[in-house]
Image (cartoon, rainbow, N blue to C red):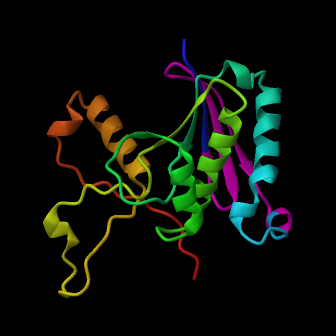
Amino acid sequence: MYKILVLNLGSTSTKLAYYENETSVVSQTIEHPAAETKVFESFMDQGEYRIGYIKRFMQENAIDLCDLDAIVSRGGHTKSLESGVYRICPEMMKQQRSGIYGLHPSDLGSEIAYTLAQKSKAIPLIIDPPITDEFEPVARLSGHPLVRRRSSLHALNHKATARRYARENDAKYEDLNLIVVHMGVVFL
């Protein structure tokens, strides 16, 4: 049996789940009020703060760090990659901290997964990071010859939604041509 801790860090929340094989045993969303996070200069400074909540989640749900096989985080911002599963390494975290490829709390999620994994046998991983780039050449056209479009999206959500659709419709993901839309909140 594989035991997996899943982390999804957002700007105002930490979503956690514990899986045994493909079964979600427990999940929780922890909200982070602005009053608590405003003391940090950036979300990348919230490591120990977020780890405290993750450890509490694990303790409350009798999840032993030493028993985990993998700690999986929503991916962060690095050089462009194809969709897939990647082992978190120091070079990846260096790219994420640089901010060159973008900044998002998911970048901190990679660091937290790596830090926790160092204290166990767990493998630190990211899956389908937001810098996933599988654009066809025509998708890079912007309408201006000096401006090339780059891929930066919620690949994890898009792929999971499309795969679920395929499964529910008894189809192969690879054979489908779908339009998947990720809708978020826009603050004006």
Residue 4 appears left or right of 158: right
From this view, report whether residue 66 is shown above or below residue 39: above
Residue 175, horizontal then vertical, whole percent: 14, 38
Residue 55, horizontal then vertical, whole percent: 79, 36
Residue at 82% x, 28% y is: 60
Residue 8, horizontal then vertical, whole percent: 60, 47
The mark total stands at 0
Query: Residue pushed farthest front?
Result: 91
34 or 104: nearer the eye?
104
From this view, report whether residue 186 is shown above or below residue 176: below
Residue 164 appears left or right of 60: left
Image quarter for residue 53?
top right
Quadrant occupied by the N terminus: top right
Q: Magenta: predominant secondary structure element?
A: strand
66 or 25: nearer the eye?
66
15 or 1: nearer the eye?
1
From this view, report whether residue 38 is shown above or below residue 32: below
Residue at 20% x, 88% y is: 144
Residue at 75% x, 62% y is: 45
Residue 107, horizontal then vertical, whole percent: 58, 56
Say if the magenta span includes residue 111: no
Residue 171 appears left or right of 68: left
Quadrant occupied by the C terminus: bottom right
Image quarter for residue 173?
top left
Image quarter for residue 163?
top left
Say if the magenta span includes residue 22: yes
From this view, report whether residue 128 is shown above or below residue 163: below
Span shown in magenta: 8-36
186 or 79: nearer the eye?
79
Residue at 35% x, 36% y is: 164
